[in-house]
Amino acid sequence: MKKKITICSVICILVLTGCAGFYKLNHRENVPDAVSSISTNQDQMLTIVANKNKIVDKKAFAEELIQRCLDNDFHTIKFSFEDGYPTSLDMNVYLWKEDIHEKDPVMKVSYKPKEWNKEYDIKNNPEQFELVITE
């Protein structure tokens, strides 16, 4: 009887440890992630999860998100830039993935050209773009 209890206890501990490890892999704290992407022509709309409790410097965070788009450095989504880089970015930012259907975004980021021109893209013409953050 003691042997069964010991085996069950060990199995429970292993399962719980595995679940915690899986959660940690898919829930990278302080590392933003794009969890949804919609593309219309070259305009990109993203749902971003900050994976943190608070965004202190929203401008710096928005600039980090744009750089992550350029570097194609999100964990969940990888972009294809075969047809070129986006001509605009719109991002709804949530603190945690669980907030997406429960709360409003904590901030919205818009990175659009100051003057619309089909030849402008976020990689090759950054001086033509304007960053707008709304809360």
Image (spheres, grey):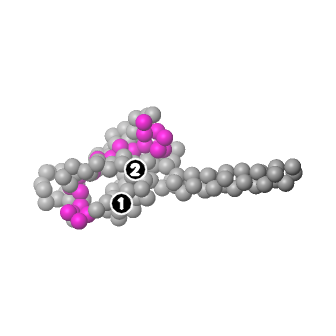
- Quick check: 101 above or below 61? above
Q: Residues within 10 Å of mark 2 (few under 14, many from 20)?
A: some
Residue shown at the point (35%, 60%) measured from the top left: 78
Q: Position of residue 71 (x, y in %)?
A: 35, 64
Q: Quadrant of residue 18?
A: bottom right
Quick one: label 1 or label 2, which is nearer the N terminus?
2
Residue shown at the point (67%, 53%) measured from the top left: 15
Position of 21 compared to 26: left or right? right
Residue at mark 1? 78
Which stretch appears magenta? 81-101
- Quick check: 124 above or below 11? below
- Mark 1 and mark 2: span between their CA atoms? 10 Å
Q: In which quarter of the image is residue 3?
A: bottom right
**Residue 12 or 2: which is nearer the viewer?**
2
Q: In the rendered structure, does residue 14 fall within the stretch colored magenta?
A: no
| Amino acid on which the number 1 mark rests in the picture | Lys
Position of 133 compared to 16: left or right? left
- Quick check: 104 above or below 1? above
What label sits on residue 35 in the rendered view? Answer: 2
**Residue 109 or 78: which is nearer the viewer?**
78
